[in-house]
Amino acid sequence: MTELLAGPIADRHAALGASFAKFGGWDMPVAYSGTVAEHTAVREAVGIFDVSHLGKALVAGPGAAEFVNATLSNDLAKIAPGKAQYTLCCNDSGGVIDDLIAYLVADDEVFLVPNAANTAAVVAALAAVAPDGVAITDLHREYAVFAVQGPKSPEVLAAVGLPTEMEYMAFADAELSIDGGSAPVRVCRTGYTGERGYEILPGWAHAGPVFDALMAQVTAFGGLPAGLGARDTLRTEMGYALHGHELSPEITPVQARTGWAVGWNKPAFFGREALLAEKENGPARRLYGLRATGRGVPRADCDVLTAAGGERIGLCTSGTFSPTLKQGIALALIDTAAGIGKGAEVVIDVRGRALPCEVVIPPFVESHV
C-alpha cells in the first residue's frame, strides 16, 4: 500500500481541527468547521485553501514557450509574459491526460501547475517529445499553493502587502514579509470557485509562515479555512471540470464543453486530428448541468434516464448539494442521440430512487471572477 503524501503545513491543519481524506495520493483536509459554512464564507467573505498537492513543473530552455504551444491544447501565443492560461494535455485520441494552468514567464520559461495525480504523466508526455535544449523538470514538492478566494480576497492580500490589481489570469512575483525576513511568492489572479480570488505560490520551506500570515487576515476579514469539501461544492456550482470526473483520458474537451481551451487554428498540439474530427462530426455525448426539481442529492456515477420511459441516456460525472441554491445539482454526460437539451426534464437514478431534474447549461450560479 502506497503511503499518502503530506503537504507542508499538515500540522496547521490538524491544529485547526481539520478532518482528512485521501485525494490524488495525498492526505488532504476535507473540512474544518463544515463544508456549508466554508462554502458560504467563500461566496460571501473569503476562504483560504491549501492546495499544495497540485503539481508544479518547469519547461525551460530556448523555444520553451513555442514547444509548449505545439503540445498543449490552448494557444499560448494569445497571451503575453506575466499571464497564465488554462490548457489541456491530451492523448492521441483526444482524451485528456490532464487539465492545467500554464504560466508564461518568458519565451524560454513556462511554469505549469497540473493536478496532483497527473503530474508525472504530464511531465513524461512533454519530456518524450522535447527538443534538445528544452528541459522539463518536476518541481512537485518545491512549491506550496494557497488559494485565497472570495469577495474580500483583495483586502486579505493587500493587508499582507501582496499585489491585487492584476487582470484576471495575470500573475506577479512579489515578496511577503514573514518573521525574520521575507518570502518570495508568485501571485496569480485565478482560482476554482467562481469568486474573485488569487493563488499564492511560496517555496515549500516558506509555506508555514506564509500560510500563517494569510490565515490571520482571512480571519480578520470574517473568513474561514476551507477544505476539499467546499472546493468541490464551489466548483460544481460553477460547472468547472474536475479531472477524473468531467475530464479523463476517455472524455474529450469537445464532450466536456472545454473546447474554448483548444487552439483550433494551431498547426500542432497533442490529439489535434482526433479533436478536429470530433468537433466536425459532433460528439457522441455532451456535458450538461442537472438541477434537481425534487428532494434528493445526486452523486457521481448515477444513471441519467428519460423522464418518460426511464431509458438510460447518460451518467452523472459529479453530484452534490448546492449550499447556494439549497438543492441538488449534478454534472452529467448525456448521449447526443437522446435529443436532450436545455430545459428538458430527466430523471437521475439515486440508489433506485427517481430524482426529477431540469437540464441546464452551467454555471448554476453567477461568476464573480
Image (tube, helix red, strand yellow):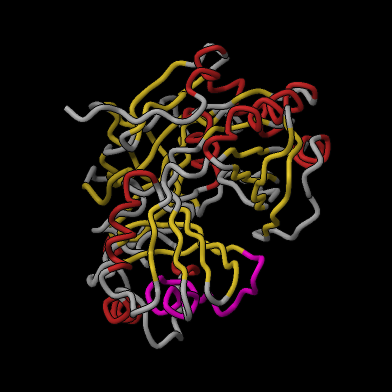
- Residue 188 on image: x %, y %: 65, 52
Q: Nearer the viewer, residue 320 or 170?
A: 170
- Residue 209 on image: x %, y %: 65, 28
Residue at the far left in the pictured view: 1
- Place residue 193 in its image quadrant: top right
Up/down of 97 relative to 51, above or below? below
| Residue appearing at x 77%, y 44% in the figure | 162
Is 110 magenta? The answer is: no
- Place residue 157 in its image quadrant: top right
Is 65 magenta? The answer is: yes
Q: Nearer the viewer, residue 179 or 249?
A: 179
| Residue appearing at x 73%, y 23% in the figure | 216
Image quadrant where one finds the N terminus: top left
- Place residue 249 in its image quadrant: bottom left
Left or right: residue 184 versus residue 16 is right
- Residue 169 on image: x %, y %: 64, 59
Left or right: residue 358 versus residue 185 is left
- Residue 158 on image: x %, y %: 82, 40
Up/down of 99 relative to 62, above or below? above
The magenta stretch is: 64-83
User: Total number of numbered labels?
Assistant: 0
Q: Nearer the viewer, residue 128 or 271?
A: 128
Left or right: residue 165 versus residue 310 is right
Left or right: residue 9 versus residue 166 is left
| Residue appearing at x 49%, y 49% in the figure | 240
